[in-house]
Amino acid sequence: MGASDQAAAAEQMQSPRVAQLDQGVWALLRDGGARADFVNAWLTLQCRMIGGAERAVALFGSPVDESLTPVAVWPEDAEFQDLASIAKLATTQRRGVLQSDERTGAVQLAFPFLVRGDVHGAVALQIEPRSQPQTRVAMRQLQWGTAWIELLVHRERVDATEASHARAGIALDLVAAALEQEGFSASVTAVATELAARLGCERVSIGWIKGQHARIVALSHSAEIGHRLRLARSIGQAMDEAIDQGATLLHVAGQAPAGAWVTRAHAELLRLHGAAAVLTVPLDAGRDSIGAITLEAVNADRLDTKAIELVEAVAAILAPILKDRHANDQLLVLKVRDSAETQLGRLIGPGYTGRKLALGALAAVVAFFAFFKTEYRVTAEAMLEGQVRRVISAPFDGYVSEEQARPGDIVRAGQVLASLDDRDLIVERVGALAERRQRQFEYDAALANGKRADLNILDAQMRQIDARIALIDAQLTRARLVAPFDSVVVAGDLSQSIGAAVSRGQALFEIAPLADYRVVLKVDERDVVDVAVGQRGALKIAPLPDRLVPFTVTRITPVSEADHGQNRFRVEGVLVPDVIASDGARLLPGMQGVGKVVVGERRLIWIWTHRAFEWLRVAVWSWLP
């Protein structure tokens, strides 16, 4: 501060007006109080300390939403519109503002109330004309004086915090009182009694919505209402009034209701039952109101602003807890009914758009499945078999000499499959030829000697030998096992049996003709009743997953066989000629896959649910006596 500023400050401090400041005003600043009283006292002190002040105004609010309102004016009847303008300018610029009137020379000062960087308002003064150094001193004094406003803001914050903590403590005590009890009825009675004791009310009632109206479920200091039905009706109507308007309602005897709320039922409650004030706070759980708390006080001061805030805090905390207690105390049937009513109300009532859209989409899908028809096909495991299976057996007792075919090989007509050892047959044939030559020589000698009896005997013996040679030749021919037609080897692997003995008639190979197959389906017993001869179907086999092989059902075996714990019936079908012509070369007996038989059109929902309904019918019938 310069020398001129110090002189001006000294001059103001020596003013007799500063020395005679009202000690009561200082006491008000020290002790605190209502905001209006504090700011009035502070503004009075500022005007006296600065000296030469003609008028002043203090405004509080936020400059962002232009909500600055005057809290104190000095003197009380002074005009302050022009001062309010400079005060708003100071809040906008967040610094002190100084301007002077060129006609009168009066100086107007304004300084914002800044608390931790936030603007809470501003003060503006108009002072007598004075020198520039004295004006700066006045501005500095105004700046120092705003520290009292910061103190006020901090006091209000501390008071609000303490009040909030007090409300929270009381609310927690009430929650503890509710949780200590067993059951919904005991909990609400404990809450009503504790709340009446805390606020000094004559009666506290808690109501619960049943149907369309609130019904009293608890009274303070009483477990039941008894015969006081008129009182119960009046309190219930007051609760309905608050719940319908969705607001906290306070009615004081002899006073008009604040705002545009309707409090007719509250006034009637006061008139009939003699209280000075009645307060009703709805109990809201989520979007829905589940009940209300009504307080009646003989002394209207008991239901002040702090009491209303406390009851609203208690209602907000207790509503979900009481709702759970009420739901847990109900019978299971009532729980199901209430849940159904709640869900139905959400679907029919306002809101819950997403749920309504989802339900509409689900209804559309169900309707589509209920009326849309498509082909119903019976599905079963399937396998290809040859129409004929020819057995190639051993023509005589012998030994395996060589093998030239294995299962899965495709062989042509006349192709050798295997050979039997024919050395013994060859030796036997040579012996038979030698014996015939011997008989021929004897026959010629008997013919030369004219022995007719010997000729007949020798001729019979030669024919016998010729028959034996013919048999040996036939056996030599059949020692080579050949395919009688174009086919595929289905069974018979002699690769590990070279030199092994075989008996006459022993099966060595099984072959099936090419391009002559039948489809064998193993149909479940629950589906076989839908299958009939002549129905068409399609087969998809594992080696050819990209092709559908059509077939026609030709035979249904009436005897079932167990397969993996289920009874299945053998259903046979034949491939259509077009398939044999196009894909016959790629199809082989033994190939497996899945077959589907078209049995007619059915509704889609029936296709998906008939198995479950059929099982349920059988199960219910088996349980019935």
Image (spheres, rainbow, N blue to C red):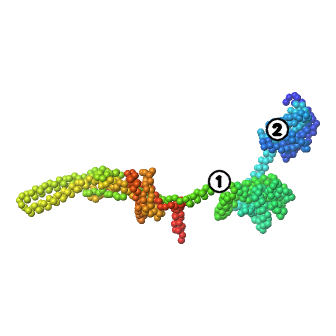
Question: Quadrant of the rendered structure where residue 285 is?
Answer: bottom right
**What type is the residue that disc 1 sits on?**
Gly
Residue indicated by mark 1 = 354
Secondary-structure class at tag 2: helix
Q: Nearer the viewer, residue 427 or 331?
A: 427
Q: Is residue 254 left or right of residue 210?
A: right
| Residue drawn at x 89%, y 33% as measured from the top left | 102
Place of residue 480 in the rendered image (x, y in percent of width and height, measured from the top left): 26, 53
| Residue drawn at x 82%, y 62% as measured from the top left | 268
What crowding class fits label 2: few (fewer than 14 Cα within 10 Å), some (14-19), or many (20 or more)? some
Q: Is residue 400 visible?
A: no
| Residue drawn at x 91%, y 40% as measured from the top left | 21
Q: Is residue 513 visible?
A: yes
Q: Spot the residue most to the bottom.
A: 625
Q: Spot the residue most to the left.
A: 449
Place of residue 307 in the rendered image (x, y in percent of width and height, measured from the top left): 80, 54
Residue indicated by mark 2 = 89
Q: Is residue 290 left or right of residue 7?
A: left
**What type is the residue that disc 2 sits on?**
Leu
Secondary-structure class at tag 1: helix
Q: Spot the residue most to the right.
A: 16
Q: How many marks?
A: 2
Q: Nearer the viewer, residue 248 or 555?
A: 555
Residue 46's place in the image compared with 381, above or below, is: above
Q: Quadrant of the N terminus?
A: top right
